[in-house]
Amino acid sequence: MSVDWQGDKALHDLEKELQKNMEQAADYLAQKTQEAIATPYPPASSPGNPPHLRSGDLQRSVHPVLMPNSFKVVADMPYALMLEFGTSKMAARPFLRPTFEKEKDTVTKIMTEGS
């Protein structure tokens, strides 16, 4: 059995569709991550829960970064890493990893089927 890809056009169309799905999945995950840190301050968040919204800088810094065959969602504020993992003086307030874990099935579905 053989598959005729009808030249480069079919392959190009497939790659284009996969790229579109990946961009949609990245945008979806970034939006859900922003929503995870939308609870207003005060009060402060409890350890183990996402940080509460103070200035909005952390929330606005969350965005997807697209690469040729993958993506990641990042938070560009210098203190994002300290919130995600904690420090010797502060318990973690993770928001990136828990959001991914919660949304990974939907992200996978978007990447394979589109939104």
Image (cartoon, rainbow, N blue to C red):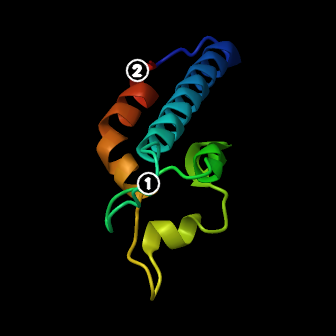
Foreground pick, 90 / 9:
90
Determine the secondary structure under disc 1. loop
Q: In which quarter of the image is the C terminus?
A: top left
Q: Is residue 13 above or below residue 59?
A: above
Give the amino acid type for the residue marked by disc 1 in the picture.
Pro
Gap in Å between the C-alphas at discs 2 and 1?
40 Å
How would you rate the neighbour count of disc 1 (Cα within 10 Å): few for under 14, some for 14-19, many for 20 or more? few
How would you rate the neighbour count of disc 2 (Cα within 10 Å): few for under 14, some for 14-19, many for 20 or more? few
- Where is residue 33 shown, x and y percent of the image? 47, 44
As drawn, is 23 to the left or to the right of 51?
A: right
| Foreground tag (2 vs 1) | 1
Give the amino acid type for the residue marked by disc 2 in the picture.
Glu
Q: Is residue 71 above or below residue 25?
A: below
Residue beneath the point at 46% across and 42% down:
38
Foreground pick, 18 / 36:
36
Q: Mark 2 points at which residue?
A: 113
